[in-house]
Amino acid sequence: MISSEIEIPLEEFADKTFDFKELFGKEHVEAEIGFCSGHFLSEYANSKPDTGFLGIEYSRKFFLRGEKNLKRRLNQDNVRIVCFEAVAVMRELVPFASLDAIHIYFPDPWPKKKHHKFRTVRFENLIMLRNRLKKGGKLFIATDHPEYAEFMEKEIALTGAFFKRLPYGGDDRPIKTKWEKKQIADCWEIHYFLLEAI
Ligand SMILES: C[S@@+](CC[C@H](N)C(=O)[O-])C[C@H]1O[C@@H](n2cnc3c(N)ncnc32)[C@H](O)[C@@H]1O
């Protein structure tokens, strides 16, 4: 149970990037985009007490729900969260080569073609995220949206000079997100991707 504030006051970072050493005092840092209720983030962070975690969620409603759950469930103080659009946070505030892993689970599918430009998982963002990862760092992605999965396949195929794709599936995930558990229970097919920064 965490009683202190875990939200990062973004206004203090208008002209500088995050200093993860100062924020976490830890060598290893991972980030989750769209942590929503914080179920995965709290369980995963509890399983890795020596790693710092940056959670990013842009819906204020979900952010507050996640913050409450995180404070209730975390066994140690290794998570910091921001309420803002994740691509902007990653691009502007996360230093190059600073992350060991990035997790993106069930990003909004933006199904209309004219809205594909809002998709988090697309070539331009993948390259930007690659630059925030350390060499050998991992990018974990999951979606239950078949057309977005196909789109991801194509975008990922263009990143061969930056990422190596590794085999990965549901059986490799001892800790699952809240949405993932629900979709598995409802027999939805889930598409998983694991990329290693080269
Ligand atoms: C379908 S929910 C999945 C939630 C959680 N990852 C899970 O698997 O249970 C997608 C979440 O990502 C958040 N989200 C979507 N796009 C985002 C973005 N660009 N920046 C930050 N949060 C985002 C949404 O507000 C929502 O909470």
Image: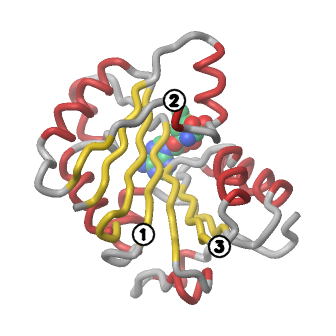
Q: Amino acid at mark 3?
A: Asp
Residue at position x 31%, y 54% in the image: 196
Distance of label 3 from label 1 (alpha carbons): 14 Å
The x and y percentages for residue 115 are: 27, 32
Disc 2, ligand 1: is the CB inside 8 Å? no
Mark linked to residue 32? none
Q: Earlier in the sequence, mark 3 or mark 2?
A: 3
Q: Report which residue position mark 3 lands on.
A: 50
Distance of label 3 from label 2 (alpha carbons): 25 Å
Distance of label 1 from label 2 (alpha carbons): 23 Å
- The reply, left or right, for residue 87 in relation to residue 77 is left
Quarter of the picture containing the C terminus is bottom left
The x and y percentages for residue 154 are: 17, 32
Residue 12 to residue 36: above or below = below
Disc 3, ligand 1: is the CB inside 8 Å? no
Q: Report which residue position mark 1 lands on.
A: 99
Q: Amino acid at mark 1?
A: Leu
- The reply, left or right, for residue 112 in relation to residue 123 is right
Q: Report which residue position mark 2 lands on.
A: 170
The number of numbered discs placed on residues in the rendered structure image is: 3
Q: Residue 141's image quarter?
A: top left
Residue 179 to residue 136: above or below = above
Quarter of the picture containing the N terminus is bottom right
Q: Earlier in the sequence, mark 1 or mark 2?
A: 1
Q: Residue 186's image quarter?
A: top right
Q: Secondary structure at mark 2?
A: helix
